[in-house]
């Protein structure tokens, strides 16, 4: 194998106005390795990868690929040289087939027209070679999240990529889909591909990578071999202090209050099934965290959307104390004591072109008015408080939300929802795309809400997170709750069969 780096980045600087995204950033990746690029939200990782992929031009520094200086090249030049980026948020056309999406922009042509049969054949051959199995004729709209992820990678490989840049590729994947992705990446690496992986999940870094580069505040601060470090060592390099990755000590027996959220016989239709939520009943008590575990797509999204007022129910009832939520709209439910961290921050949590300050009052703007006009002084003071409390970066409250990293966007949503006067908090994937330091902080906030007598309904694709935070755990499968257990009676081994449908018991 060549001793020349596949990628060498030296002393890169990049500013966006007053914000310094990269300062002296450096990266060296060898051919045929899986290399992790890690750091806190806003550390400059995605900016550096956008520079490498030709989406941005650096203000200073050099970019070399295969020993050739390519500083300031375009996206087209990067793709032609075999560099491809798979973004965290999919860029697929849902109304087209898998094959049509993969070849889009490079369509095979026969007699001057698009050759659909050839496109299908080429995509099927590439799918078989790479191990990225997905039916070429399926509409993207009908794919699971994991299948859509495969299509994104196939698009990149179809264009001849040998250097793959993956930005948070497992953020929306279930554990089985993550395991399949690792098999694919190892197969690609063993075939000579070079892979740069941006992730906040340190167990993934340990499981699949060969070497690690750590960034902090725009700069490269440490390089290490994966086999020579630990998750704790990586976390400390990322944030500059020790991080308690396992959380604090658990108290198995807790005093809880009266039921705060009562759900009875709830049925909710889904996009593709008549009953995505199929007759669910449970009670969430004041002073507890009830975690819902399960492979994504088993009704968790529809359940929380229905409670929040974002989706119509077919039957059943939802109450906070003695208040009937079904009679209330979203704002009315908020006033009744419901707060909601949605699972998709872009679709449900933010208006990306609004400022940080304005996003921090969404849904609560009526509380920041004076004589019917928005009180900018109060909004700015609120923003300063939330930005400091949740370490949102950059700290300029006038910046649009789209200018922030995904993790800092998530912090805006959580900071806003935790500031409400709530009795029940719906927390859907609260740490998705968030760095280890922020995860530690968010977990502490959820526990503090619980300890203050609030009721927290947690949905997370991370089973470890559910087990770490919850006082009780429910498992959803096929739109139903198949078991509810006290935390001390749960483990990954016990819950696994319930999550896959291999076990079931009366709730």
Image (cartoon, rainbow, N blue to C red):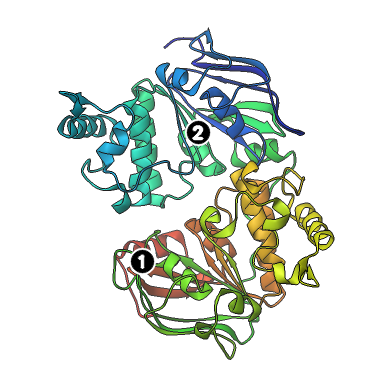
Q: Nearer the viewer, residue 503 or 259?
A: 259
- Residue visible at 26% across and 48% down in the picture: 139
Q: Which residue is mark 2?
A: 197
Count of numbered tags: 2
Element type where label 1 sits in the image = helix
The answer to whether one can see residue 248 in this image is: no
The quadrant the C terminus occupies is bottom left
Element type where label 2 sits in the image = strand
Q: Quadrant of residue 450?
A: bottom right
* Real-space CA distance between mark 1 and mark 2, rounded to the nearest whole angstrom: 31 Å
Image location (x, y in percent) of residue 208? 46, 35
- Residue visible at 27% across and 41% down in the picture: 98
As drawn, 109 above or below 382: above
Direction from residue 18 to residue 303 in the image, left or right: left
As drawn, 375 above or below 147: below
Q: Which residue is mark 1?
A: 498
Crowding at dot 1, Cα within 10 Å, few <14 / some 14-19 / many 20+, comes out as many
The answer to whether one can see residue 318 in this image is: yes
Crowding at dot 2, Cα within 10 Å, few <14 / some 14-19 / many 20+, comes out as many
Number of the front mark, 1 or 2: 2
Direction from residue 485 to residue 415 in the image, left or right: right
As drawn, 406 above or below 66: below
Direction from residue 426 to residue 108 in the image, left or right: left
Q: Nearer the viewer, residue 483 or 125?
A: 125
């Amino acid at each position: 194998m060549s001793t020349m780096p596949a990628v060498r980045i030296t002393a890169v600087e990049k500013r966006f106005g007053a914000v310094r995204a990269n300062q002296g950033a450096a990266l060296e990746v060898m051919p045929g390795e899986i290399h992790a690029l890690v750091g806190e939200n806003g550390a400059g990782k995605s900016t550096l990868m956008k520079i490498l992929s030709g989406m941005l031009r650096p203000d200073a520094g050099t970019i070399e690929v295969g020993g050739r200086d390519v500083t300031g090249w375009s996206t087209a030049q990067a793709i032609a040289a075999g560099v491809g980026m798979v973004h965290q948020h999919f860029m697929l056309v849902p109304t087209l087939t898998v094959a049509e999406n993969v070849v889009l922009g490079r369509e095979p042509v026969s007699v001057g027209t698009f050759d659909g049969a050839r496109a299908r054949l080429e995509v099927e051959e590439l799918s078989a070679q790479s191990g990225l199995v997905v039916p070429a004729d399926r509409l993207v709209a009908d794919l699971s999240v994991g299948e859509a992820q495969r299509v994104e990678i196939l698009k990149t490989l179809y264009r001849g990529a040998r250097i793959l840049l993956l930005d948070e590729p497992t953020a929306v994947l279930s554990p089985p889909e993550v395991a399949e992705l690792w098999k694919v990446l190892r197969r690609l690496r063993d075939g000579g591909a070079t892979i740069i992986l941006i992730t906040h999940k340190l167990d993934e870094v340990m499981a699949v990578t060969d070497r690690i580069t750590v960034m902090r505040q725009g700069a490269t601060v440490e390089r290490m071999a994966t086999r020579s470090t630990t998750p704790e060592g990586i976390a400390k390099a990322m944030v500059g202090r020790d991080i308690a990755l396992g959380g604090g000590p658990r108290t198995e027996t807790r005093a809880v209050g009266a039921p705060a959220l009562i759900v009875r016989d709830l049925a909710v239709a889904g996009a593709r099934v008549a009953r995505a939520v199929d007759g669910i009943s449970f009670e969430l008590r004041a002073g507890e965290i009830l975690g819902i575990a399960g492979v994504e797509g088993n009704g968790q999204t529809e359940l929380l959307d229905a409670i929040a007022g974002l989706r119509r129910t077919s039957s059943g009832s939802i109450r906070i104390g003695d208040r009937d939520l079904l009679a209330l709209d979203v704002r009315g439910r908020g006033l009744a004591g419901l707060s909601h961290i949605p699972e998709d921050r872009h679709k449900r949590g933010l208006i990306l072109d609004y400022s940080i300050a304005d996003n921090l009052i969404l849904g609560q703007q009526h509380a920041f008015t004076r004589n019917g006009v928005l009180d900018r002084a109060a909004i700015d003071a609120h923003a300063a408080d939330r930005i400091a409390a949740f370490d949102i970066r950059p700290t300029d409250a006038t910046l649009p939300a789209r200018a922030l990293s995904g993790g800092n966007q998530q912090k805006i949503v959580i900071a806003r929802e935790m500031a409400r006067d709530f009795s029940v908090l719906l927390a859907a994937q609260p740490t998705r795309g968030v760095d280890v330091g922020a995860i530690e902080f968010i977990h502490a906030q959820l526990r503090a809400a619980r300890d203050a007598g609030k009721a927290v309904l947690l949905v997370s694709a991370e089973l470890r997170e559910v087990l770490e935070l919850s006082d009780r755990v429910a498992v959803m499968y096929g739109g139903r709750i198949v078991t509810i257990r006290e935390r001390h009676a749960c483990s990954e081994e016990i819950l696994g069969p319930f999550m896959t449908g291999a076990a079931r018991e009366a709730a």
